[in-house]
């Protein structure tokens, strides 16, 4: 594979050059540039680059599938692009002056990606640690009453307790405001003395300057942190323009803390809490309708959501809050079937294709799923390209999801479905999770055999 610098330079060239790029973000596997003129993009050349595993070029935007090393490519790309110099020289306009015709949902997805991408390694790492701890408990290797178990549990779950602070930090970077002030504001609402004010499930009133405000437990919540940090950015940017530079260091943090803590406690926090409750109730209702059907639907459509890059909406609005509140979620298990369904389809192509290059790519796609839980190579390199493997993979995933729903499988952490992340599903339903993944893999493989691949490039042998 080409070096990050070489790949970044070629990507920049094929995206129309420096002047054609307004901004760039990335998620766990994709670069997401915002462009001035999409007609200047050479999509075919980008797809052929060594290091690019796929491309989404839809009306919703351009997404370049890189893989787990997307962070390195992003850093190299930003160095090559040098957006600040271009802005100073007037070669491109700032993002605010760019195209205004954006769908609200696309803007929401971009916001979610920028806020939660930096947290993914931490969520995955803590999730695996939690899974290994539960597995050790189940096998009798570690007593649940031991201090070792307590320390390991605290280590693995602290990320969710302090999730408002972590979210405030990444949101502050997205909104270009002080992360330290954002953390201080949210920190005030999860301090022990504040939590001591909360009675039962919260909602009880306490007085602040003679005004009664409802108080809640904000540990593990993300919506109040995002709303508060956005408001902080608006206030900070306004004060920077209006207050003399010599007074910035004293006045701005003082005013922000004095204003934002009460507003967040009395207004933003309760609103965010009620939104979180509404989402949780909707999730519970969906899960309780019929878990077999729910598992089949989630498993079956998940690859489609990934294909269009919109899976981050349910990830952040449903799955992560569900795990943060309850310590587990069935939806993370159902979604994992999508990976193994596509891996099964890829394995069928590996077995039947006479095209050596395609066989090698299929093996790479399978390895990507099994070791890192990244399914995009299989989706774009095989599913989207040949169509029937995508259909077979989705159907296989639906079968696995239905099986998991039948036995009420749950996952204990936010991780991508792969062999290396199986410990995150440790517990009484671990066996059903593994069987469900096997069903998805075999289903995707067998259905690909049945449907076949009509494209002559695949050079598929007929079933004997």
Image (cartoon, rainbow, N blue to C red):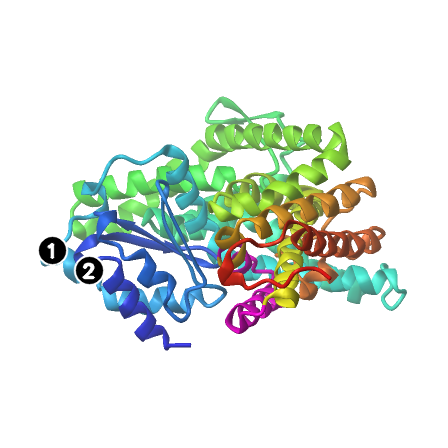
Residue 46 in picture, x, y percent from top left: 34, 62
Q: Nearer the viewer, residue 202 or 455?
A: 455
If the image is split into quadrants, where does the C terminus sit?
Answer: bottom right
Looking at the image, which residue is at 33% across and 49% down?
177
Residue 183 in picture, x, y percent from top left: 46, 50
Which residue sits furthest right? 140
- In front of the other: label 1 or label 2? 2
Residue 360 in picture, x, y percent from top left: 55, 72
Q: Nearer the viewer, residue 267 or 27?
A: 27
Looking at the image, which residue is at 56% across and 58% down?
375
Q: Is residue 369 highlighted in magenta?
A: yes
Residue 335 in picture, x, y percent from top left: 64, 47
Which residue sits furthest top? 211
Query: Which residues are drawn in magenta?
Result: 354-380
Residue 136: quarter of image: bottom right
Residue under circle 2?
A: 18
Residue under circle 1?
A: 91
Query: Is residue 79 rendered to the left or right of residue 56?
Result: left
When the figure is inspected, residue 241 is found, relative to residue 199, above or below; the finding is below
């Amino acid at each position: 594979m080409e070096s990050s610098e070489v790949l970044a330079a070629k990507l920049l060239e094929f995206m129309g050059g420096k002047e054609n790029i307004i901004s760039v973000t990335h998620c766990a596997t994709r670069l997401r540039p915002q462009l001035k003129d999409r007609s200047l993009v050479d999509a075919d050349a980008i797809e052929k680059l060594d290091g690019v595993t796929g491309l989404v070029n839809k009306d919703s935007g351009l997404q370049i599938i890189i893989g787990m090393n997307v962070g390195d490519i992003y850093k190299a790309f930003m160095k090559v692009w040098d957006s600040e110099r271009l802005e100073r020289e007037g070669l491109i306009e700032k993002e605010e002056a760019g195209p205004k015709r954006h769908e609200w949902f696309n803007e929401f997805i971009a916001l979610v990606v920028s806020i939660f991408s930096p947290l993914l390694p931490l969520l995955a790492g803590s999730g695996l640690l939690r899974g290994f701890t539960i597995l050790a408990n189940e096998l009798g290797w570690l007593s649940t009453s031991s201090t070792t178990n307590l320390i390991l549990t605290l280590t693995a779950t602290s990320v969710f307790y302090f999730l408002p602070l972590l979210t405030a930090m990444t949101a502050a970077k997205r909104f270009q405001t002080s992360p330290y002030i954002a953390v201080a504001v949210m920190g005030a609402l999860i301090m022990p003395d504040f939590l001591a004010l909360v009675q039962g499930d919260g909602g009880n009133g306490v007085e602040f300057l003679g005004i009664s405000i409802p108080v809640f437990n904000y540990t593990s919540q993300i919506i109040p942190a995002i709303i508060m940090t956005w408001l902080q950015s608006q206030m900070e940017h306004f004060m920077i323009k209006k207050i003399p530079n010599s007074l910035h260091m004293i006045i701005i943090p003082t005013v922000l803390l004095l204003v934002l803590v009460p507003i967040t406690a009395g207004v933003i926090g309760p609103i965010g809490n009620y939104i979180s409750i509404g989402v949780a109730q909707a999730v519970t209702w969906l899960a309780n309708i019929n878990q077999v059907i729910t598992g089949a639907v989630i498993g079956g459509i998940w690859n489609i959501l990934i294909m269009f890059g919109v899976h981050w909406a349910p990830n952040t609005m449903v799955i992560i809050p569900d795990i943060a509140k309850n310590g587990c979620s069935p939806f993370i298990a159902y979604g994992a079937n999508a990976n193994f369904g596509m891996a099964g389809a890829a394995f069928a192509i590996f077995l039947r294709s006479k095209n050596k290059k395609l066989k090698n790519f299929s093996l790479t796609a399978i390895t990507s799923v099994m070791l890192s839980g990244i399914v995009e190579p299989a989706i774009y390199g095989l599913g989207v390209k040949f169509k029937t493997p995508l259909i077979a993979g989705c159907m296989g995933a639906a079968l696995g999801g239905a099986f998991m729903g039948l036995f009420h499988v749950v996952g204990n952490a936010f991780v991508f479905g792969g062999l290396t992340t199986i410990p995150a599903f440790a517990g009484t339903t671990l066996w059903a999770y593994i069987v469900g993944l096997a069903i998805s893999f075999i289903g995707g493989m067998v259905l690909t055999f049945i449907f076949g691949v009509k494209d002559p490039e695949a050079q598929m042998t007929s079933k004997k």
